Amino acid sequence: MHQQDERLQLERAAQALYKRYAASIFAYARLHTPSWEDAEDLTLEVFTAALEQDSLSWLADKQQFVWLRRVAQNKLADRYRRSIHVSVIPLEQVVESVRAGETLLPEQVIVRREELQRLYTAVGKLSLLQQQVLQLRVGDGLRFADIAILLNKREETVRKLYSRTLALLRTIYKQH
């Protein structure tokens, strides 16, 4: 009976830990991995390591997050060491490109490529922080609160940065 209570307590603690920090760890992983799936895998590896760690439950909330983040960094470093750095394009993106290409005339395809190139060039002129905020908000669909946690900034600061980034991006895009 005592073992069952202890096991139930550990399961609840693990669930609470996951609910509290999974979004932040995933967002961090997504920043540093080429695909959504890789970020999910890394997040799973981090929380698997957390479940195997007995002393984690004794740490304060902030210390637990720091520990999880450090594990995520180490797992990323391990992946980089093992990988050949092959760029990965998600299948959904390829399918969308093919479908879009089928319905466009050749002239429209050329115009679209030129517009995309202009956009990539404009985004490349933004600071790394601006690019990260743009990727997390537009590319990954994260909320401002989640981005703020990930970047260790206040939510209002992230909102202002995002707004200013979009304004700057429009200006750069119009100039080219």
Image (tube, helix red, strand yellow):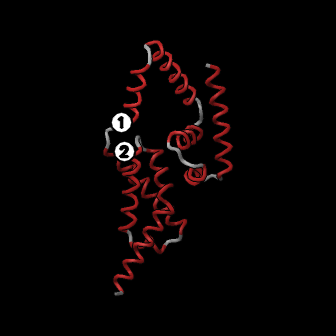
Tell me the quadrant of the picture where the N terminus can be found. bottom left
Q: Quadrant of residue 35?
A: top left
Tell me which label, 1 or 2, sits earlier in the chain. 2
Up/down of 102 relative to 87, above or below: above
Up/down of 138 relative to 54, above or below: above
Which kind of residue does numbered mark 1 sit on? Leu
Task: Work out how far the residue at label 1 is from the one at label 2, CA to CA, in angstroms.
Answer: 22 Å
Mark in the foreground, 1 or 2 = 1
Q: Secondary structure at mark 2?
A: helix
Q: Residue at x 65, y 42 (%)?
A: 161
Instruction: Judge by depth and name the residue closer to the eye, 132 or 109.
Output: 109
Please provide percent x and percent y for residue 36: 41, 44
Tell me the quadrant of the picture where the C terminus can be found. top right
Up/down of 5 relative to 25, above or below: below
Report the side of 161 relative to 76 (left or right).
Answer: right
Please provide percent x and percent y for residue 119: 55, 26
Q: Residue at x 52, y 27 (%)?
A: 120
Mark 2 Cα shell of 10 Å, populated few (<14), some (14-19), many (≥20) = few
- Residue position marked by numbered label 2 in the rendering: 80
Instruction: Judge by depth and name the residue closer to the eye, 129 or 15.
Output: 15
Instruction: Judge by depth and name the residue closer to the eye, 99 or 46.
Output: 99
Mark 1 Cα shell of 10 Å, populated few (<14), some (14-19), many (≥20) = few
Q: Residue at x 49, y 66 (%)?
A: 64
Residue 91's disc is 1
Which kind of residue does numbered mark 2 sit on? Tyr
Q: Residue at x 56, y 52 (%)?
A: 146
Residue 162's disc is none
Q: Secondary structure at mark 1?
A: helix
Instruction: Judge by depth and name the residue closer to the eye, 96 or 47.
Output: 96
Please provide percent x and percent y for residue 37: 38, 46
